[in-house]
Amino acid sequence: MFHNSEALERYVSELHVPVLVSNETPLISNLNMVENIALIEEVHCNKSIADAEKKAYGMLQSVGLQEIAYKRVATCNAAEILYVMLLRALMMQTDTIYMKLPHTITVGFKEIRTIINEVQKLMGEKKLFILDLKINAVHYEGCACSIVK
Amino acid sequence: MWLLGAFEKIGASVIGLYEALYEVLHFTFVCLIHALNPKSYNPAMVSVLVRQIYFTAVEIIPLFMILAILFGSVIVGVVLWLAMNYSLQNEIGAILVTFVVDEFAPFFTALLISLRSGAAINTEIAVMRVNNELNTLKTFNIDVIDYLFLPRIIAGILSMIFLSFLFAILMLLSGYIFTFLFLNFDFYSYTHMIISDLDMRDFVILLLKSLAFGFVTMLIPLYSGLKTQKSYTAIPVSVLHGMVKLFIAIFMIEVVSLLVQLL
């Protein structure tokens, strides 16, 4: 948790890993949700389209969002978009996932806690860190992730 | 004083032009390097390539064929009528081949593809830039050139070559309609007249012009979209500028090819 946004941005600039989930890394608008998630392994692991999309669809199914699989960004709500952004980040070959200011992606901290707790089931050995301001700290109590202070 | 100001403006414009030309040439060189790197070709890139070929070349085929047949019958008819009026009956084959295969087919195909695909690509890239989606690709270590630009450039070149050849064939075949109705040519005489005046030079000209047109038809809209200011109101401005630059490039290629053929 940071006192102000300048301190947060300074921390982000000093990180050696990119912040994968933020409003500066939106979903690709000309791809559907499955394609957005599958894109990562198609590029980095050379996985075939069919295999990557099958895995992506499976991930959406495990959080109960298979109905948005073939929808595009414009037809999904903010909570669904945050789910897909987190699932997309999980596809990266990294042990640590940083999420910056999640309330700028979706409204409602209760929603954010629910989404994080749901996605936590798929995280395995990966760790999720939230970067947010101190005034929002109370909203993350009971959240199944680490909060950077 | 005003003269000095005028010279300054001219100088600044020339410098700006050279800088823009250098940037485009540098961008072209980078794209070519990526095209030659086997690692650029992953499943996502191939998927974009296939989709772009479908949108650029396959979807347009019905309209394209209608235009080729309409233009073919009318324009070939006009060319033949002029040839008859100026007692050039013996040169009809050579005139048709030069006009249709060397000039009209690649030029018209370039205009059609640039209007349809060029504008769409410029808009798509401009929207991605404004929405920060290019930053998403960069953050996730997805090379923008490999994923966005290269498949579109390759698709543009392949589509242009295929459609130019198709246009030339259809235009020449539909030209037979006029020759049959007004000149009583039989099909064998007409095709023999065309084939006897076709040589490898015409195929090479058609291929090289299609290659050049296909390259710029994709490169310029991509580059223009990439340079869009980060505001939604800048998108139509970017598309307008991109299309103007593209048409100028198409005309320049045509002029250069005519000059080279005259040498």
Image: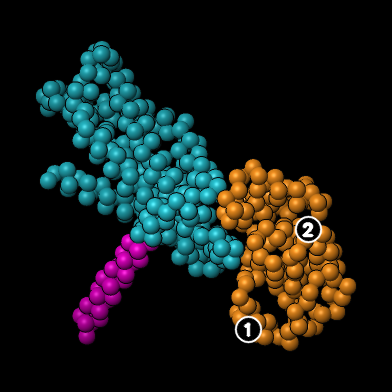
Local secondary structure at mark 1 = helix
Q: Residue at x 36, y 39 (%)?
A: B161
**A7 shown above or below B81:** below
Give residue A144's mark. Answer: none
Residue of label 2: A122
Q: Label 2 sits on what residue type?
A: Leu
Judge from the rendering whether residue A34 lies leftward or rightward of residue B233; answer left or right. right
Pick whichever, B194 or B138, lies toward us.
B138
Question: Separation of disc 1 and disc 2 at Cα?
Answer: 30 Å
From what the image shows, is residue A133 above or below residue B164? Answer: below
- Residue A10's tag is 1
Q: Secondary structure at mark 2?
A: helix
Q: A1 above or below B179? A: below
Palette colour of chain A: orange
Dot placed on the residue nearer the N-terminal end, 1 or 2 = 1
The reply to whether label 1 and label 2 mark residues of one chain is yes
Q: What span is in magenta?
A: B1-27
What color was chain B assigned in the picture? Answer: cyan
Question: For residue A105, which quarter of the picture?
Answer: bottom right
In which quarter of the view is residue B130 placed?
bottom right
**Counting other residues with Cα less than 10 Å from the Cα at mark 2, is it few (<14), some (14-19), or many (20 or more)?**
some
Horizontal side of B191 relative to B34 (left or right) equals left
The reply to whether discs 1 and 2 touch (Cβ–Cβ < 8 Å) is: no
A21 falls in the magenta region: no
Find residue B4 and report its image quarter. Answer: bottom left
Which chain does the residue under circle 2 lie in? A
Task: Give residue A4's position: percent from left, percent from top.
Answer: 71, 85
Q: Nearer the viewer, residue A140 or B37?
A: B37
| x and y, in percent, of residue B68 in the image | 37, 31
Give the side of residue B225 with respect to residue B200, left or right.
right
